[in-house]
Image (cartoon, rainbow, N blue to C red):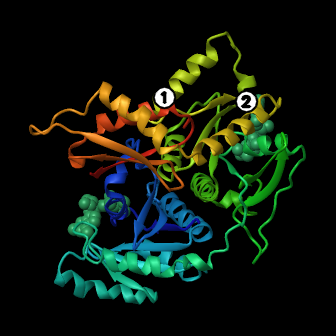
Amino acid sequence: MSYTVAIVGRPNVGKSTFFNRLLEERKAIVDDVSGVTRDRQYGVTEWNGRSFNVIDTGGFVHGSEDVFEIEICKQVKTAIDEADVIIFMTDAATGITDLDDSLANILRRATKPVLVAVNKVDNNNRYLEATEFYILGFEQVFFISSMSGSGTGELLDAVTALMPAEAEIAVEKTDLPKIAIIGQPNVGKSSLLNALTGQERTIVSDIAGTTRDTIHTHYNLFQKEFMLIDTAGIRKKNKEKDDLEFYSVIRAIKAMDEADTCLLVLDAEKGITAQDINIFSLAARKGKGIVLLVNKWDLIEDKATNTARDYEHELKKRIAPFNDIPIIFISAKEKTRIFKAIEIALEVCENKKQRIATSKLNEVMLKAIEAYHAPVVRGNSIKIKYVMQLPTHVPSFAFFANFPDDIKTPYKNYLENQLRSHFNFKGVPVRIFFRKK
Ligand code: GDP
Ligand code: GDP
């Protein structure tokens, strides 16, 4: 299921500090590139055993005060449309500002739950001052310190309390592979969809009450059936008022949550952007199968023999270490290799489902371990005695060892590479765990 929490608020209230606290060690994977300007950050986290998406809307805007206010208001409106819960962050150290008032005015009219987080309540004095935020008129106000973490647990409890119980979630009852087409605006997602389905799809307008964030189309090709999950065809009427980047990423996240495998579409002329890498990492972290489609390949003039190979090589460098990924050069416009893309996506779905017999797994992996042992740590020689695949959706392997905590990342990477070289996990994230034997 897809559940998304957006953190909104003016700059410097502590949104990013809070976000980082939520993501903790996962941050390194998610927040890959941050330039001089603060990029918006996307991540996935877990609290009370429930997993949800978190978006730090950043709040960084170029321009004068006025432009600035307009842009932040846009972000808030997009958050209201697209997120399931909004955390409205304010700052106890500065108190209520005019911009807080403007944002509160927009948020009070929201149909989504709004939780006010009064941040920087680092001590008791601050707490007394912070009670002024009740004036904003929201029912749920939390006093937190993102820096120390105090109060953040209660806030997150409130978030998970708002999530529908697993049992209430209407899941599409299907065993068919689910493939999502995702990517940034204008890379050619709609064109690809139209080329595949062979019909022009009209833009679905936003009908109150019946709005869906994704369209599921049952599809039949090469005697294979699958579901295509698409958000490309759906755009809001007031699209031009939206913050397009925010909007498109949040849609991509929703589509990927519902999919087994994502077709991440890139524009051949633009190459892979920091935002694409963010989305890629998020898909990997969510355990989704991934296929990279380099679209608009027809525009690449010099298609000398090595062009595609060099391009692929560069792409793989950018997405390393997880680069055992199919890369396909397509043209939605000229309909080249678009069915190939689907075929490969279905293969990735199969790769993801595969279960490897324990005997075969041990035969292959124990040999690999014999060939190259984990380094000795504190005089302990590490012995891995047994491997098994765990019964999970994302292919996961438990290696049983005498000192599981002493096995470091490089060796883990070695084992993953060995797994990938002996079994076909192309396009699929693989998880490796070490357990005490
Ligand atoms: P953003 O622009 O809303 O994302 O704000 P940042 O997360 O970048 O934080 C702005 C500043 O506030 C930074 O200097 C943080 O260290 C500081 N800050 C964030 N949370 C707290 C907090 O709980 N207490 C205090 N005292 N400072 C904080
Ligand atoms: P979306 O926003 O990702 O759904 O992108 P669209 O499908 O709307 O395409 C954006 C623009 O790129 C349109 O002008 C398309 O005609 C163009 N386009 C899409 N695919 C291709 C392609 O394979 N080659 C070329 N040359 N243009 C393409």
Q: Residue at x 50, y 46 (%)?
A: 284
In the image, 401 versus 408, the foreground residue is 401
Q: Quadrant of ligand 2?
A: top right
Q: Which mark is residue 330?
A: 2
- Closer to us: mark 1 or mark 2? 1
Residue 182, given in percent of the width and then of the height, sits at 65, 47
215 on left or right of 420? right
Please identify the quarter of the rendering in which residue 265 is found.
Answer: top right
**Label 2, ligand 2: CB separation under 8 Å:** yes
Q: Residue at x 67, y 29 (%)?
A: 328
According to the picture, the residue beneath numbered tag 1 turns out to be 421
Residue 172, given in percent of the width and then of the height, sits at 71, 66
Mark 1 Cα-neighbour bin, 10 Å: few <14, some 14–19, many ≥20: few
The answer for how far apart the CA atoms under marks 1 and 2 are is 27 Å
The image shows residue 265, relative to residue 40, as above or below, that is above
The image shows residue 235, relative to residue 158, as above or below, that is above
In the image, 349 versus 16, the foreground residue is 349
Amino acid type for the residue under numbered disc 1 = Ser
Residue 95, given in percent of the width and then of the height, sits at 31, 78
* Residue 80 visible to an observer of this rendering: yes
Q: Earlier in the sequence, mark 1 or mark 2?
A: 2
Amino acid type for the residue under numbered disc 2 = Ile
Residue 107, given in percent of the width and then of the height, sits at 53, 78
110 on left or right of 135? right
